[in-house]
Image (tube, grey):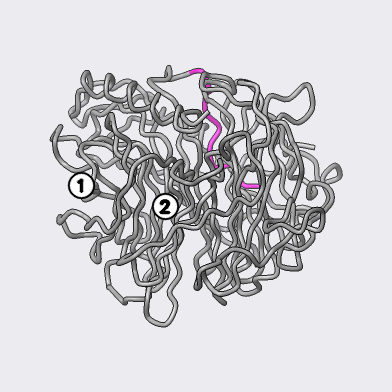
């Protein structure tokens, strides 16, 4: 079963290489739309009290105007924000280098708080990454960011590069600090401690023994050195699930969530949802051992046991594949409060159902059932975040009535009362998928100041009705005719684009 988790990635490699060769560059929450163009819950009586809509929502298509003619499936987005200067951000997606088949894969860079974005080809991967996540930490005080990235190369030999740049606006390629093969889905978080960047990369590492593949790579010196910690302590069916998600709090507490795969029949993974914790930022030889389960006294709290997770590397939910949706977030100012969300089979009528649970005692105990308004049917791409004022937020994409509907839901009180903002509601059956993942195996959500910021991918038809909170395009588009153009008036086919957004945190 060793190749199972990397099968998604290897499938993507083959389809992307073929695609690139021919590319030419130039209760669920129920949405309704109001006259003011903002999404909200359909019934306050059904769902409890609802906060007023945010005063200003920003949604921006990341594709620059210079690439108005492109038709790539720019899926699986990610975002990093420099907390010392939130005007500086880096986003990414499965976007190929538009001018060179041998040049570095690009990232998107904004230096004006997300109003505009440019491509900068600096990742240490040729042409296009398979997976890429990244984080900006302020510990080393670089004005335009100290970006730490984990990338997988789209090549016959899948290689992880853990790399950095101290200036995201520079055209110099990122410096590779650590590299190895036989890993999947790196997921990067970072925290500044004592003027040094501490970096945490969750990944599925097939170099680990005994099928304990859930791993966190830890660097305490800005990426100069890394140490790998397997965080699985129990018997697996030969591996854990691909998703390993770290989360860090300001007091140096680090959590990680993963799927402990106990059985697999080729279609269903019987899995525990496991959370581990380290109270010293991963310092020492035995990191992530602080949290033990009462059932067996082993490291790692079992939030839920033996849930059924459908595994499909084919279009299953709309045109998207499913099988590894997972997120974790910790209150940045109170590390006792932590949320974890995942997707499983749910009821017999649902293909894929999201769930969110909460702990208020550092992961020792968890809510016994889903938090209100967080059992969401036929949905994927869950991302959680907690703002400085303790407000929790949930980003997800739901297949509803033939459309992909992207929500951000906020709450002061563990989702008892919620505010739901709809960012996009787009046709799910077009454009036709070019490869998998269609929208991505994940999207991303962060908090900074009084905003939640994030990224998602969607059909890019320039139709304002598809974006009820408003939208801005950089690429050339005719919103009256609802068509894309190449900048010279020639029509361009629709595709999947990455979108940046910001939503004010409810006060």
Q: Residue at x 21, y 59 (%)?
A: 169
Q: Which residue is mark 2?
A: 79
What secondary structure is found at the residue carrying circle 2? strand
**Residue 159 locus on image (x, y percent):** 31, 41
**Residue 279 locus on image (x, y percent):** 60, 72
Instruction: Please tell me whether residue 344 is drawn above or below residue 273 in the rendered image.
Output: above
Q: Which residue is mark 1?
A: 121
Instruction: Please tell me whether residue 350 is drawn above or below residue 367 in the rendered image.
Output: above
User: In this view of the protein, which residue sits in the foreground, 315 or 324?
Assistant: 324
Q: Earlier in the sequence, mark 1 or mark 2?
A: 2
Please tell me how crowded label 2 is: few (under 14), some (14-19), or many (20+) other residues with Cα within 10 Å. Answer: many
Query: Which residues make up the magenta segment?
Result: 420-429
Q: CA distance from mark 1 to mark 2?
A: 16 Å
Give the main secondary structure of the magenta stretch: strand
Which quarter of the rendered picture does the C terminus lie within? bottom right
Q: Residue at x 65, y 30 (%)?
A: 269
Q: Quadrant of residue 271?
A: top right
Q: Residue at x 41, y 27 (%)?
A: 461
**Residue 191 locus on image (x, y percent):** 45, 69
Work out whether residue 437 can be spotted: no
What secondary structure is found at the residue carrying circle 1? loop
**Residue 396 locus on image (x, y percent):** 60, 41
């Amino acid at each position: 079963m060793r190749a199972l988790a990397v099968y998604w990635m290897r499938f993507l490699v083959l389809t992307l290489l073929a695609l690139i060769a021919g590319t030419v560059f130039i209760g669920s929450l129920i949405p309704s739309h109001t006259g003011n163009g903002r999404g909200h819950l359909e019934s306050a009586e059904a769902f409890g009290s609802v906060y007023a809509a945010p005063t200003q929502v920003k949604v921006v298509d990341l594709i620059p105007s210079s690439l108005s003619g492109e038709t790539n499936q720019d899926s699986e987005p990610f975002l990093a924000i420099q907390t010392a200067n939130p005007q500086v951000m880096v986003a990414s997606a499965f976007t190929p280098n538009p001018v060179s088949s041998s040049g570095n894969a690009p990232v998107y860079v904004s230096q004006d708080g997300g109003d505009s974005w440019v491509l900068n080809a600096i990742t240490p991967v040729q042409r296009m990454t398979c997976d890429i996540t990244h984080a900006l930490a302020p510990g080393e005080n670089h004005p335009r960011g100290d970006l730490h990235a984990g990338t997988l190369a789209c090549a016959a030999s899948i290689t992880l590069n853990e790399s950095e740049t101290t200036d995201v606006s520079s055209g110099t390629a990122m410096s590779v600090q650590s590299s190895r093969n036989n890993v999947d889905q790196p997921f990067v978080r970072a925290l500044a401690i004592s003027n040094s960047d501490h970096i945490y990369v969750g990944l599925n590492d097939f170099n680990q023994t005994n099928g304990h593949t859930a791993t966190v790579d830890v660097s305490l010196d800005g990426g100069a050195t890394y140490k790998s910690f397997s965080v699985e302590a129990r018997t697996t069916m030969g591996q854990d699930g691909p998703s390993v998600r770290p989360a860090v709090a300001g007091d140096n507490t680090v959590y990680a969530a993963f799927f402990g795969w106990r059985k697999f029949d080729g279609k269903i993974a019987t899995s525990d949802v496991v959370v581990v914790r380290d109270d010293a930022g991963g310092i020492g030889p035995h990191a992530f051992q602080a949290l033990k389960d009462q059932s067996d006294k082993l490291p790692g709290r079992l939030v839920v046991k033996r849930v059924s997770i459908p595994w499909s590397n084919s279009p299953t939910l709309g045109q998207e594949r499913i099988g590894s949706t997972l997120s974790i977030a910790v209150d940045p100012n109170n590390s006792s409060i932590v949320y974890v969300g995942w997707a499983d089979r749910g009821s017999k009528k649902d293909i894929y159902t999201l769930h969110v649970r909460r702990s208020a005692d550092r992961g020792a105990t968890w809510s016994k059932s889903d938090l209100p308004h967080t059992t969401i049917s036929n949905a994927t791409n869950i991302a959680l975040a907690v703002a400085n004022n303790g407000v929790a937020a949930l980003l997800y994409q739901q297949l509803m009535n033939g459309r992909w509907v992207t929500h951000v839901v906020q709450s002061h009180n563990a989702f008892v009362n919620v505010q739901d903002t709809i960012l996009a509601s787009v046709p799910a059956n077009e454009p036709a998928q070019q490869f998998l993942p269609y929208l991505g195996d994940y999207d991303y959500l962060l908090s900074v100041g009084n905003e939640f910021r994030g990224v998602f991918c969607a059909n890019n038809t320039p139709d304002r009705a598809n974006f009820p909170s408003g939208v801005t395009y950089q690429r050339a588009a005719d919103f009256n005719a609802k068509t894309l153009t190449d900048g010279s008036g020639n029509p361009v086919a629709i595709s999947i684009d990455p979108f940046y957004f910001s939503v004010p945190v409810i006060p």
